[in-house]
Amino acid sequence: MYKWSKTQYIALTGMFTAIIFLLMFMGIGILPLPFMRPTILHVPVIIGALLMGPKYGAVLGFMFGLASMLFATFNPGLTSFVFSPFINMPGTEAGSLMALAVAFIPRILVGVMSWYVFAGLRKLLSPKLTIANYAIAGIAGSLTNTFLVMHLIFVFFGSTWNAARATPSPSDAIYAAIWGIVITNGIPEAIAAAVLVAAIVSALVVVIEKSSLRVRKR
């Protein structure tokens, strides 16, 4: 949305990274439920992407992935092995490097996808719908995270993930269980992201445009 100086990009990236890790360490960024860990850590990634663009959104997404991996490593749950290669898979004495793909790829794409959805909406819709555009970008980023995380879990871990759950599904219903989590976790996370991103970005835009910061709109 804005073109910042190099120093400003670094400062903003550091600030949003600090927010991501602060949310994680405070225990409110990832909720440790027995079978899944819903998150709001994608929200600062999306906000950062909308303010700075897809490249920095990807950097913040990487930080989100790192925070997720560290949380799974130091606060392990039943299925933490799908996010951290340092947690042994059930029945083995080793973790899987595929956990890195689950932890990082979807999160990096959160920042990229939310920016391009927002940029596309600006071209297709009137600029007067900016708040709605923020909300839709928030939904897109959130659903990117949930959809890709759960489907990469299915691809790389499938039956192992299912067996480790507190209430495993029949072997022929694993994909249905994946979609159940996409829906039950993904929809509330997407709604929360829509509200938070729209409210916070709208407020930040007002502050930025009334401040003495020398920034140009993209």
Image (cartoon, grey):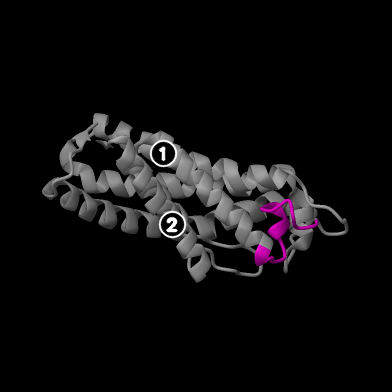
Q: Mark 1 points at which residue?
A: 56
Disc 2 versus disc 1: distance between alpha carbons? 14 Å
> Which quadrant would residue 161 be assigned to in this image?
bottom right
Q: Along the horizontal axis of the image, is 157 left or right of 210?
A: right
Let me know if residue 142 appears in the view.
yes
Q: In x, y percent, where is residue 12?
A: 34, 47
Q: Which residue is drawn at 58% across and 51% down?
A: 66
At label 1, which amino acid type do we have? Tyr
Q: Mark 2 points at which residue?
A: 18
Q: Residue at x 58, y 55 (%)?
A: 68
Q: Which of marks 2 and 1 is nearer the N terminus?
A: 2
| Dominant secondary structure, magenta | loop
Q: Which residue is drawn at 46% across and 45% down?
A: 60
Q: Tell me where the magenta segment starts and ends, as one range.
A: 74-88
> Which quadrant would residue 189 be assigned to in this image?
bottom left
Which of the image's four quarters has the C terminus?
top left
At label 2, which amino acid type do we have? Ala
Q: Is mark 1 on a helix, strand or loop?
A: helix
Q: In x, y percent, where is residue 152?
A: 65, 43
Q: Is mark 2 on a helix, strand or loop?
A: helix
